[in-house]
Image: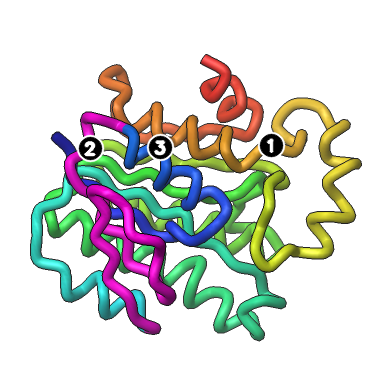
């Protein structure tokens, strides 16, 4: 029975993943720290506080799997520095804490186009985050790179709503993907006994896994 640490449980992908983990008999407990309380669920432990980093640092229990579905935008965060504190610092530091608690598999929501050498802040930050996680030398590391996410996000992101019809027509890894499909793929990969080392899944690969 697996004990899971899930970050981003109140988000688009994280919420879908939380539902799947709740239904999985292989999961005994889901620790889901959030800034606002989640609806109570079976198997769920929900530490609540504004400082997610402090909530994670305070954990003192064994963890088997670490999922990170955190993600914001520069506009939502308010500045480039605030964006980086979430999408790089919080992700990387939380992964380090999960590893110290015994987690063997780290599964992280990155983004299509993640590239540490990119001139674009979003893609560069995602790429640097991936590199930092690789340097942590996880036994198993899964990096998911979805394209534009489709789902009922709260609050909605206007740019995503405007771009979704176009992205649904794009080919390959650029095609928009349902958030629930990303969650399904992450969930399936967590219990894939054939994995080893680092696995990078582009958006079309995530969609294919979700269909299996």
Which mark is in front, 2 or 1?
2
The residue indicated by pointer 1 is: 177
Q: Is residue 23 left or right of residue 126?
A: left
Number of numbered discs: 3
* Of callouts 2 and 3, the N-terminal one: 3
Which mark is in front, 3 or 1?
3
Residue 102 is inside the magenta segment: no
Callout 2 touching callout 1 (CB < 8 Å): no
Residue 41 is inside the magenta segment: yes
In the rendered image, the quadrant that contains the N terminus is top left
Foreground: 52 or 205? 52
Q: Residue at x 89, y 42 (%)?
A: 165
Question: Dot 3: within a 10 Å radius of its alpha carbon, few (fewer than 14), some, or many (20 or more) residues?
Answer: some
- Most extreme residue toward the left, as rendered? 61
The way the protein has been coloured in the rendering is: rainbow
Tag 1 secondary structure: strand
Question: Dot 2: within a 10 Å radius of its alpha carbon, few (fewer than 14), some, or many (20 or more) residues?
Answer: some
In the rendered image, residue 199, in percent from the top left (x then y), is placed at: 42, 32
Look at the image and tell me whether residue 137 can be seen: no
In the rendered image, residue 114, in percent from the top left (x then y), is placed at: 61, 50
* Of callouts 2 and 1, the N-terminal one: 2
Which mark, residue 27?
A: 2
Rounded to the nearest angstrom, the CA distance separating label 2 from label 1 is 26 Å
Which mark, residue 20?
A: 3
Residue range in magenta is 24-50
Q: Is residue 108 left or right of residue 208?
A: left
Above or below: residue 84 compared with residue 163: below
């Amino acid at each position: 029975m697996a004990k899971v640490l899930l970050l981003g449980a109140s988000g688009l992908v994280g919420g879908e993943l939380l539902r799947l983990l709740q239904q999985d008999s292989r999961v005994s407990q889901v620790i889901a720290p959030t800034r606002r309380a989640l609806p109570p669920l079976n198997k769920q432990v929900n530490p609540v506080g504004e400082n997610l980093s402090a909530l994670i640092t305070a954990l003192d229990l064994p963890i088997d799997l670490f999922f990170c579905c955190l993600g914001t935008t520069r506009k939502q965060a308010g500045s480039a520095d605030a964006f980086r504190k979430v999408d790089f610092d919080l992700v990387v530091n939380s992964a380090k804490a999960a590893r110290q608690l015994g987690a063997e598999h780290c599964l992280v929501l990155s983004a299509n186009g993640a590239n540490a050498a990119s001139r674009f802040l979003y893609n560069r930050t995602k790429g640097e985050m991936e590199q930092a996680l690789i340097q942590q030398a996880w036994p198993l590391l899964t990096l998911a790179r979805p394209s534009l996410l489709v789902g009922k996000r709260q609050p909605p992101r206007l740019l995503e709503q405007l771009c979704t019809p176009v992205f649904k027509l794009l080919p390959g890894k650029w095609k928009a993907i349902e958030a629930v499909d990303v969650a399904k793929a992450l969930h399936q990969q967590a219990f894939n006994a054939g994995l080893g080392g680092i696995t990078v899944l582009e958006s079309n690969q995530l969609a294919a896994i979700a269909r299996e």
